[in-house]
Image (cartoon, rainbow, N blue to C red):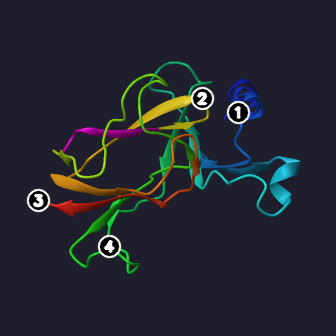
């Protein structure tokens, strides 16, 4: 990794609201943390590996690669045993609609098809659309608009169709 790319990565971290970031690749591995991240519960951790995106031709562009997992899983909470949960693939801010004055992408009781947008999660100033991976009915929206969400946190309780 050249100095220019490394400095661009540090600059991108500095300008973000993320509390910590881990990088591993090209023979390098490091972690960045803000002072606030050491105070328990003040800021969430990134929980994802971050790599420069050389495909775009801009070494300062950042893409996040969450650890492998299934975004749809079953939980053993108060849910119906046939229901599943759609989980957050990244740490970020959860938005139910594309803008403040727009209606929510989905509501409880709505049937959605695979590929339909469910929400947006903002991470490192990037808007990431979360789409349904299966045809299902939204049983419950488990997160409020504007809340921080953690990696693998259940966002929607769904009933597969």
Between 67 and 98, which is closer to the camera in this rendering?
98
Question: How far, Cα to Cα, is label 4 from label 3?
Answer: 15 Å
On-image quarter of the C terminus: bottom left
Which numbered disc, 1 or 4, marks the residue closer to the eye? 4
Check contact, mark 1 vs mark 2: CB within 8 A: yes
**Residue at position x 74%, y 52% from top?**
43
Label 1 crowd (10 A; few <14 / some 14-19 / many >=20): some
On-image quarter of the N terminus: top right
Region rendered in magenta: 114-120
Q: Which residue is mark 3?
A: 161
Ranked by sequence position, the earlier of labels 4 and 2 is 4
**Residue at position x 32%, y 73% from top?**
74
For the residue labelled by badge 4, is the local secondary structure a helix, a strand or a loop?
loop
- Please state if 93 lies on the left or on the right of 75 as rendered: right
Residue 113 place in picture, x, y as percent: 15, 44
Residue 116 place in picture, x, y as percent: 23, 38
User: Splitting the image into 4 quarters, where does residue 18 fall?
Assistant: top right
């Amino acid at each position: 990794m050249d100095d220019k790319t490394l400095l661009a990565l540090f600059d991108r971290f500095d300008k973000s609201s993320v509390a910590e970031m881990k990088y591993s690749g090209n023979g390098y591995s490091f972690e960045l943390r803000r002072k606030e991240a050491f105070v328990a519960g003040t800021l969430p951790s990134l929980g994802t590996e971050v790599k420069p995106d050389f495909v775009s031709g801009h070494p300062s562009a950042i893409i996040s690669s969450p650890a492998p997992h299934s975004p749809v899983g079953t939980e053993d909470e108060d849910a119906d045993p046939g229901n599943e949960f759609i989980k957050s693939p990244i740490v970020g801010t959860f938005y139910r609609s594309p803008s403040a004055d727009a209606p929510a992408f989905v509501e409880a009781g709505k049937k959605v098809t695979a590929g339909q947008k469910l929400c947006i999660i903002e991470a490192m100033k990037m808007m990431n659309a979360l789409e349904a991976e299966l045809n299902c009915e939204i049983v419950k929206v488990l997160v409020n608009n504007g809340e921080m969400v953690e990696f693998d946190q259940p966002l929607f309780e769904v009933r597969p169709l």
